[in-house]
Image: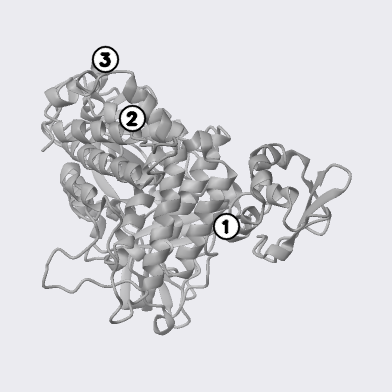
């Protein structure tokens, strides 16, 4: 697939594949494979594809550069528009975002989340929903029996059930058989979910489709673990919604709702580049109020890497403010008539007025408490909240660390506290054109350096922090030396640390510091745990489908394959893995050799139960890795 092709709306592609005959669907993957290489960009912004002498497909994107209507994709062959050529050309193009960015609404016009119609009849969940609850899932339903649970409409329940079935079919097929037809079924179900008012479920389905594409095309950025997590999120969301009772947060909102925030005073923390896989780029500047509340201002538009690199000095479009993002990251704003989203993002409504304020250093003002709290406590607070709370852009923590040295692809540091564990620093964004990786590599060459770090914890890895900004530690002689105009911090995504920003060559690290001894191996309870056996089984199912799980289970007896799990006390994980393997191999047939139960629901529920339990167990191990140092080879007990 070429990213130079115009994005295609998911529903347009789904409709094109659905209109094909069964014979043509079998040929679709082969037709799509080399289609992008024949694309020709015309002067009128259209793109043409040549299929032989008599078939010419033309994509004419709309003003936004996206193919959003079926009429914008035409073919000259006799079977058009129900032809293989047109479907192949649409399948070769990247998927467009579900809902293009809309202007930020004023508080009085901000849409509310979809409300359930009173008196709607609830339907029961598909068979197997109890398995997820027993495995440790946390369905988004009310825990108080006396509290009314919001009811979904019949259309929403039906859309969720259809999406569950499409996701189960895609999981049973796996990457190897998850071609264009399977992806189109998911896209069709996702579009139905969008029309029914389930944008979160639709977004989860689009992530799965993009992951399947990346895996089948063997892109370097593809990670099987990410696709496994996307399947888990999609199945969990669709399964709970199909039960007819779910928390409003599980349905999602189609647009970010802004409410009146009154008068605010915010101070800049840092800025970081934003670069998405769908071609969007820009910047987000993180802000902090005197009471500790987190806010942000973003400027993200189509443009990719060039947009992300240039937006760092773009003007802040907020209430007539004369600052750019570089100035706001070290300055502040007094805002009158502010509009704020639930995530803390500031809007630029018509009545908003903003006045610049002088900047403050991290050691003063509202930023100081961020670095006074131990990192383990801050991470524990994130993990104790909702599962997606730690994924928001405002989930930043601060800590003072001492550089230990480079170890593989990460930088090892130790928090400047007694009995603190080793922490791993990884680039906030690994793109080589952004300076994150280069800055961390330069910091690693100064073992013993005292550093103040502001970053986002990576909750999929043990004790891992992705820093977005760094600064010197007050009172420490062996620390950074930044220009005064930087106000004591450097944005790692925009500013490149040079030799002059580090201690001079004649200033040596403390003799007793970490630089005087070899770089140790940081303990990793996640990697040392036998839970990798469950993870490998789940990822085998995603890569090869149901058949691959059944074949893997036939290779060894359950007591041999999952004995280490039981000996480590992880009996629930062993039982769920065994049940998944048994369900994958269960293919009952009637007297004529036909499948007696062709539905993939049972297999999907067994896979989701094991995946949900694994995610909860790994989350516990990650939380444990942030506490006091664990002896190498020891694994904290999972409750």
Q: Earlier in the sequence, mark 2 or mark 3?
A: 3
State the residue position of label 1. Answer: 10
* Vertical placement of residue 376 versus 338, above or below: above
Q: Residue at x 32, y 55 (%)?
A: 239
Residue depth check, mark 3 versus mark 1: number of the one nearer the observer:
1
State the residue position of label 2. Answer: 537
Q: Residue furthest right?
A: 53
Distance, label 1 to label 2, CA atoms, is: 31 Å
* Vertical placement of residue 505 versus 19, above or below: above
Q: Nearer the viewer, residue 583 or 64?
A: 583
Relative horizontal placement of residue 231, taking residue 184 as reference (left or right): left
Disc number placed over residue 518 in the picture, else none: 3
The percent coordinates of residue 583 (x first, y second) are 31, 36
Residue depth check, mark 1 versus mark 2: number of the one nearer the observer:
2
Q: Residue at x 14, y 23 (%)?
A: 634
* Vertical placement of residue 275 versus 316, above or below: above
Q: Quadrant of the N terminus?
A: top right
Q: Quadrant of the C terminus?
A: top left
**Circle 2 — which element?**
helix
Q: Residue furthest top?
A: 518
**Circle 1 — which element?**
helix
Residue 443 visible in the shown view: no
Relative horizontal placement of residue 304, taking residue 397 as reference (left or right): right
Q: Residue furthest front?
A: 591
C-beta proximity under 8 Å, tags 2 and 3 = no
Q: Nearer the viewer, residue 220 or 630?
A: 220
The percent coordinates of residue 292 (x first, y second) are 23, 62
Residue 42 visible in the shown view: yes
Residue depth check, mark 2 versus mark 3: number of the one nearer the observer:
2
Dot 1, crowdedness within 10 Å: few (<14), some or many (≥20)?
Answer: many
Dot 2, crowdedness within 10 Å: few (<14), some or many (≥20)?
Answer: many
Q: How many marks?
A: 3
């Amino acid at each position: 697939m070429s990213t130079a092709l115009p994005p295609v709306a998911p529903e347009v592609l789904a409709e094109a594949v659905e209109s094909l005959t069964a014979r043509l669907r079998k040929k679709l993957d082969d037709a799509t494979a080399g289609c992008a290489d024949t694309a020709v960009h015309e002067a009128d912004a259209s793109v043409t594809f040549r299929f032989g002498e008599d078939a010419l497909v033309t994509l004419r994107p709309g003003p936004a550069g996206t193919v959003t209507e079926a009429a914008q994709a035409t073919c000259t062959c006799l079977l058009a528009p129900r032809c293989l050529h047109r479907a192949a050309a649409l399948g070769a193009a990247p998927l467009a975002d579900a809902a293009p960015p809309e202007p930020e609404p004023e508080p009085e016009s901000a849409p509310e989340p979809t409300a359930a119609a009173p008196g709607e009849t609830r339907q029961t969940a598909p068979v197997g929903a109890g398995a997820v609850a027993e495995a440790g899932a946390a369905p988004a339903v009310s825990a108080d029996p006396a509290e009314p649970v919001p009811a979904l409409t019949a259309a929403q329940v039906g859309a969720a059930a259809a999406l569950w079935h499409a996701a189960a079919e895609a999981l049973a097929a796996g990457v190897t058989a998850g071609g264009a037809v399977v992806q189109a079924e998911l896209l069709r179900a996702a579009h139905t979910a969008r029309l029914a008012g389930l944008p979160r479920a639709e977004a989860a389905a689009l992530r799965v489709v993009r992951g399947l594409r990346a895996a089948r095309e063997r892109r370097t950025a593809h990670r099987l673990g990410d696709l496994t997590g996307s399947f888990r999120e999609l199945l969990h969301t669709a399964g709970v919604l199909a039960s007819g009772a779910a928390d409003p947060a599980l349905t999602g909102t189609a647009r970010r709702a802004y409410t009146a925030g009154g008068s605010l005073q915010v101070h800049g923390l840092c800025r970081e580049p934003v670069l998405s896989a769908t071609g969007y780029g820009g910047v987000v500047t993180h802000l902090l109020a005197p009471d500790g509340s987190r806010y942000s201002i973003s400027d993200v538009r189509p443009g990719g890497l060039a947009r992300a690199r240039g937006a760092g000095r773009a003007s802040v479009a907020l209430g007539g403010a004369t600052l750019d993002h570089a100035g706001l990251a070290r300055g502040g704003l007094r805002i009158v008539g502010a509009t704020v989203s639930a995530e803390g993002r500031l809007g630029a409504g018509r009545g908003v007025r903003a006045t610049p304020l002088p900047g403050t250093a991290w050691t003063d003002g509202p930023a100081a408490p961020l670095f006074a709290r131990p990192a383990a406590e801050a991470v524990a607070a994130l993990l104790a909240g909702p599962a997606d709370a730690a994924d928001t852009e405002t989930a930043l923590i601060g800590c003072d660390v001492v550089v230990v040295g480079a170890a593989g692809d990460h930088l090892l540091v130790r928090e400047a506290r007694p009995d603190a564990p080793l922490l791993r620093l990884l680039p906030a964004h690994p793109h080589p054109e952004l300076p994150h990786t280069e800055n961390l590599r330069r910091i690693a060459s100064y073992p013993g350096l005292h550093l103040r770090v502001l970053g986002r914890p990576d909750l999929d890895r043990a004790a891992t922090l992705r820093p977005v900004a760094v600064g010197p530690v007050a009172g420490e002689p062996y620390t950074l030396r930044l220009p005064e105009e930087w106000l004591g911090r450097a944005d790692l995504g925009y500013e490149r640390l040079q030799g002059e920003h580090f201690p001079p060559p004649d200033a040596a690290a403390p003799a007793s510091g970490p630089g005087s001894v070899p770089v140790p191996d940081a303990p990793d309870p996640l990697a040392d745990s036998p839970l990798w056996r469950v993870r490998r089984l789940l990822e085998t199912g995603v890569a090869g489908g149901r058949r691959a799980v059944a074949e893997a289970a036939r290779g060894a007896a359950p007591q041999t394959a999952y004995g280490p799990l039981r000996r480590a006390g992880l009996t629930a994980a062993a039982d769920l893995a065994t049940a998944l393997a048994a369900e994958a191999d269960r293919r009952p047939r009637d007297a004529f050799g036909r499948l007696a139960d062709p539905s993939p629901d049972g297999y999907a529920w067994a896979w989701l139960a094991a995946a949900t339990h694994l995610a909860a167990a790994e989350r516990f191990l990650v939380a444990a890795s942030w506490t006091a140092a664990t002896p190498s080879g020891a694994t904290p007990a999972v409750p």
